[in-house]
Image (spheres, rainbow, N blue to C red):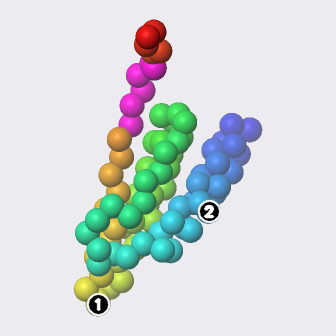
């Protein structure tokens, strides 16, 4: 049963990322999307799917290059500061 949940979650992640990748311009070398997620686990899943899509984003035979995906993942505990 746990495997089914992972597959379903990856499909939802893919659906969101396809929308983002559809509006990216690979010829621009600037940050074009920022994805913020609430957990490290979800961040790792999103990064994995984004890397898969990015590898397929360049068009062979053209000057378009694949997208670059960068991830900043933090697993630390947030602490509230008293003022």
Q: In front here: 4 or 35?
A: 35
Give the residue at x 34% y 67%: 67
Q: Position of residue 45 (x, y in %)?
A: 50, 45
The residue at which mark 2 appears reads as 15
- Tell me if 62 is positioned left or right of 44 in this view: left
Is label 2 in a helix, a strand or a loop?
helix
Q: Quadrant of the C terminus?
A: top left
Looking at the image, residue 11 lies above or below residue 80: below
- Name the residue furthest top: 82
The residue at which mark 1 appears reads as 61
Query: What is the C-alpha distance between the residues marked 1 and 2?
Result: 27 Å
Query: Of circles 1 and 2, which is in front?
Result: 2
Q: In front here: 67 or 3?
A: 67
Magenta segment: does it hold 48?
Answer: no
Give the residue at x 47% y 69%: 21
Q: In front here: 43 or 52?
A: 43
**How packed is label 2: few (under 14 Cα within 10 Å), some, or many (20 or more)?**
few
Query: What residue range appears in magenta?
Result: 73-78
- Tell me if 41 is positioned left or right of 81 in this view: right
Q: In front here: 9 or 43?
A: 43
Give the residue at x 50% y 74%: 22
Is label 1 in a helix, a strand or a loop?
loop
């Amino acid at each position: 049963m746990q495997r089914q949940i992972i597959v379903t979650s990856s499909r939802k992640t893919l659906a969101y990322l396809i929308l983002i990748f559809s509006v990216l311009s690979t010829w621009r070398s600037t940050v074009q999307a920022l994805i913020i997620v609430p957990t490290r686990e979800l961040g790792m899943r999103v990064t994995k799917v984004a890397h898969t899509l990015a590898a397929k984003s360049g068009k062979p035979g053209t000057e378009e290059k694949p997208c670059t995906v960068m991830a900043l993942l933090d697993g630390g505990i947030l602490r509230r500061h008293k003022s």
